[in-house]
């Protein structure tokens, strides 16, 4: 169902539970079933490259037939995003405002949420491109808190955009004042106020309109993303956890807030379950403990589909290992 119907899959979960491995294997599985898949990571650690055991980076990279990968780098996104916004603002603003714009951008770079804001616009663009060129876009998201913030950001971003629009209205007034004080070309520099009405608002409306349009376009893009991400007919969020106490507790909290955010939570991947044939006293004790946790998972998350994946003897790295993991996901019912 998930792999036949959905257009966007997102993986969440506590650090180290297997999000990258699961999302990569899921991408392999979907491509084997004939889907054209784009696998995207927003993790600064370049984990897709580790999972596939090859370089990927910020360019769409062919990983297997019908499977492309892309690693977004949050730091780079912030720099590129701010450079773009700065250029945009400068294009529409009087040179007198440039230093103010640069000051604002320096503050923005350090402000909480700057990375997420920049990242989200990129994610929004990747989703638009993905929906156009691919059957399925799979996101291997970074750990829980970050993911939750990221996904709830379109609304925060709308507020941020609104803030910029208001700031623009204020700076329009400031620009207006500056306009009066700035000698016009060919005029008497000793008497810049000689003709305060002429040109005072010349071009101002068009300029203001252009900034406003750029900001509104961004707001609309994020709104569309929000719509895609909260639409359960197109998007599914899978949460990965291991049968251990802390991941269970964290998953409980995350499930609550995901449901609050109205994100389409489609199930849990319970990863790294000790296989039945693992032997020895130590593993028997471990398995007894695990049984308690698995029962807890069944109890706490009874309403969600649960896909169970066994622990493997070795790490899962490279396409062949991921293909094997894909078989395990298939056996788990995905
Ligand atoms: N079922 C499994 N059996 C054996 N090893 C596994 C299994 N699932 C994942 N691993 C291994 O566990 C390690 C962590 O997995 P992975 O990188 O997918 O976790 P993650 O949730 O993406 O971590 P992070 O939060 O750091 O991004 C990797 O070395 C991976 O190969
Ligand atoms: Mg990872």
Image (cartoon, rainbow, N blue to C red):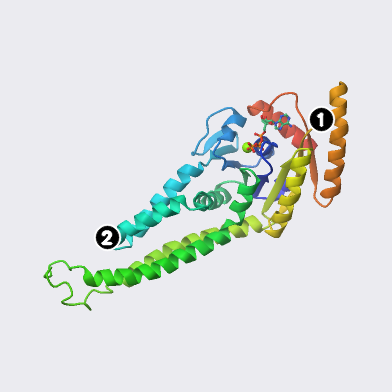
Q: Can residue 139 be seen in this view?
A: yes
* Ligand 2, image quadrant it occupies: top right
Q: Residues within 10 Å of mark 2 (few under 14, many from 20)?
A: few
Give the x, y percent position of residue 70.
Answer: 54, 39
Q: In terms of image quadrants, where is residue 276?
A: top right
Q: How crowded is mark 1: few (under 14 residues within 10 Å), some or many (20 or more)?
A: many
Give the x, y percent position of residue 104.
Answer: 39, 57
Q: Nearer the viewer, residue 50 or 156?
A: 156
Q: Residue at x 60, y 58 (%)?
A: 226
Which residue has dot 1 on it? 274
Q: Nearer the viewer, residue 38 or 134?
A: 38
Left or right: 292 as drawn, with respect to 44: right
Q: In this view, does 17 lie above or below 12?
A: above
Work out how far the residue at label 1 is from the one at label 2, CA to CA, in angstroms.
65 Å
Which residue has dot 2 on it? 95
Q: In terms of image quadrants, where is residue 99?
A: bottom left
Specify whether tag 1 is near ligand 1 (CB below 8 Å): no
Q: Is residue 203 visible?
A: no
Q: For the residue labelled by badge 1, is the local secondary structure a helix, a strand or a loop?
A: loop
Q: Residue at x 73, y 51 (%)?
A: 253
Q: Residue at x 72, y 29 (%)?
A: 324
Q: For the residue labelled by badge 2, is the local secondary structure a helix, a strand or a loop?
A: helix
Specify whether tag 2 is near ligand 1 (CB below 8 Å): no
Q: In this view, does 54 lie above or below 293?
A: above
Q: In terms of image quadrants, where is residue 98?
A: bottom left
């Amino acid at each position: 169902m998930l792999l036949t119907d959905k257009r966007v899959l997102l993986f969440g979960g506590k650090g180290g539970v297997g999000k990258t491995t699961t999302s990569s294997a899921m991408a392999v599985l979907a491509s084997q079933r004939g889907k054209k898949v784009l696998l995207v990571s927003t993790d600064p650690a370049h984990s897709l490259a580790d999972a596939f055991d090859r370089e990927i980076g910020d360019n769409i990279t062919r990983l297997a037939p019908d499977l492309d990968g892309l690693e977004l780098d949050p730091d780079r996104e912030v720099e590129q995003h701010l450079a773009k916004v700065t250029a945009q603002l400068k294009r529409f603003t009087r040179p007198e405002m440039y230093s103010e714009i640069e000051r604002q951008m320096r503050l923005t770079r350090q402000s909480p949420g700057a990375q997420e804001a920049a990242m989200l616009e990129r994610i929004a663009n990747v989703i638009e491109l993905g929906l156009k060129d691919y059957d399925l876009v799979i996101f291997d998201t970074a750990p829980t808190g970050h993911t939750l913030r990221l996904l709830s950001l379109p609304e925060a971003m709308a507020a941020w955009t609104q803030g910029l629009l208001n700031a623009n209205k204020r700076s329009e007034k400031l620009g207006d004042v500056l306009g009066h004080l700035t000698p016009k070309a060919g005029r008497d520099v000793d008497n810049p106020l000689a003709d305060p009405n002429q040109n005072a608002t010349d071009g101002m409306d068009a300029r203001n309109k252009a900034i406003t349009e750029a900001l509104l376009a961004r707001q609309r893009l994020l709104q569309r993303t929000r719509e895609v991400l909260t639409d359960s007919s197109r998007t599914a969020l899978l949460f990965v956890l291991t049968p251990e106490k802390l991941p269970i507790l964290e998953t409980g909290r995350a499930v609550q807030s995901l449901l609050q955010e109205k994100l389409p939570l489609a199930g849990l991947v319970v990863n790294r379950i000790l296989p039945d044939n693992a032997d020895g006293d130590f593993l028997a004790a471990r398995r007894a403990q695990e049984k308690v946790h698995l029962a807890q998972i069944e109890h706490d998350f009874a309403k969600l589909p649960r896909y169970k994946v066994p622990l493997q003897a070795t790490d899962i790295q490279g396409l062949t290992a991921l293909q094997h993991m894909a078989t395990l996901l298939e056996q788990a019912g995905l």
